[in-house]
Amino acid sequence: MIMPYRLTSTIIGVSIALTILFLVRKDYIHVRHTLWWFLLAIASIIAGAFPNVVDRIAWFFGVNYPPTLFFSLGFAALFLKILKMDIELSKQEKEIKRLIQRIAILEKRDRGSED
């Protein structure tokens, strides 16, 4: 028996949502990072359970093949997520550099007071 794509997409969305809940509960992922993943899960559930919604949104934007819109939005969301991660990583690298400098200054002061 072949599963209809609607059911498959809905199951994938629910699985993503449950996985995110599990990861948050076990403290493997910070709560503030879960918003993106819950949006992905909700989009998958909506696309699976209500494919007409995706068709209507695609028609509104003039897209002839509705899955193209869905994948384009997915790529855009991934791009934004990666960009956000790079921005956060850059901030952390700057902060680590400042902390290393502060520690070096404190260690130098500490050695100077021992003499």
Image (cartoon, helix red, strand yellow):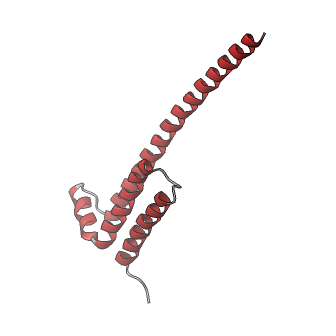
Horizontal and vertical percent position of residue 53: 24, 65
Residue found 70% across the figure and 19% down from its top: 107
Residue farthest along the right direction in this orientation = 115
Side of 63 relative to 30 (left or right): left
Side of 2 relative to 56 (left or right): right
| Residue 73 location, quadrant | bottom left
Side of 108 relative to 23 (left or right): right
Q: Where 94 sits versus 9, above or below? A: above
Q: How many marks?
A: 0
Of residues 42 and 51, the one nearer the viewer is 42
Residue farthest along the front direction in this orientation = 114
Residue farthest along the bottom direction in this orientation = 1
Side of 32 relative to 94 (left or right): left
Q: Name the quadrant of the N terminus.
A: bottom left
Horizontal and vertical percent position of residue 63: 28, 58
Q: Where 48 sits versus 94, above or below? A: below
Of residues 63 and 30, the one nearer the viewer is 30
| Residue 62 location, quadrant | bottom left
Residue found 42% across the figure and 53% down from its top: 34
Q: Name the quadrant of the C terminus.
A: top right
Horizontal and vertical percent position of residue 29: 50, 53
Residue found 68% across the figure and 13% down from its top: 109
Residue found 21% across the figure and 57% down from its top: 60
